[in-house]
Amino acid sequence: MSYCRFSGGSDVYLFGHAGGYFQCCACRLKPNDDFFDNTNTPTIEGALKHLKEHQDVGHKFPAHAVERLQKELAQEYLSVLETKHRPTKGLKKRAKQQAKKFVSETLT
Ligand SMILES: [Zn+2]
């Protein structure tokens, strides 16, 4: 399932690999321009930071890719919070805010 694919609005093809990591397929940040040169990152935070690297060189990617990563990050934060606290509505809100904060600090 991809977050974004190459198109008029996207210079990035990012998807969740079955191997449990994020793959930036045929990453255009790779210097040799090898079509099959991928960038892999194991974490959601890493994937967002990688998008930032693309943004820094002027590459485009759709907002929905970031929104989906942010949602998944909130889920991840929530599961971490739930191991430390009893599940409440407040935790969900906190996880969402944490994810939002990470995204806004990473992608400007
Ligand atoms: Zn890339």
Image (tube, helix red, strand yellow):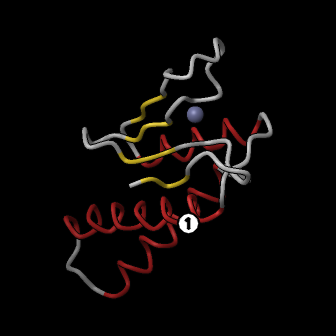
| Picture residue at 50% right of the left edge, 36% below the top | 24
Residue at far right of view: 58
Q: Is residue 98 above or below residue 7?
A: below
Residue at far top of view: 32
Report helix, strand or loop for mark 1: helix
Q: Is residue 105 left or right of residue 44?
A: right
Please tell me which residue lies in front, 14 or 96.
14
Could you tell me which quadrant the N terminus lies in? bottom left
| Picture residue at 66% right of the left edge, 49% below the top | 7
| Picture residue at 74% right of the left edge, 53% below the top | 108
Mark 1 highlights which residue? 67
| Picture residue at 36% right of the left edge, 37% below the top | 42
Q: Position of residue 9 (x, y in %)?
A: 72, 54
Q: Is residue 70 left or right of residue 89?
A: right
Q: Position of residue 35 (x, y in %)?
A: 56, 22
For ligand 1, give the image quadrant: top right
Q: Position of residue 32 (x, y in %)?
A: 64, 11
Tell whether circle 1 marks a residue whose Cβ is less than 8 angstroms from ligand 1: no
Residue type of the residue flagged with mark 1: Glu
Q: Is residue 71 above or below residue 9?
A: below
Mark 1 Cα shell of 10 Å, populated few (<14), some (14-19), many (≥20): some
- How many tags in the picture? 1
Q: Is residue 18 left or right of residue 24?
A: left
Q: Is residue 49 above or below residue 70?
A: above
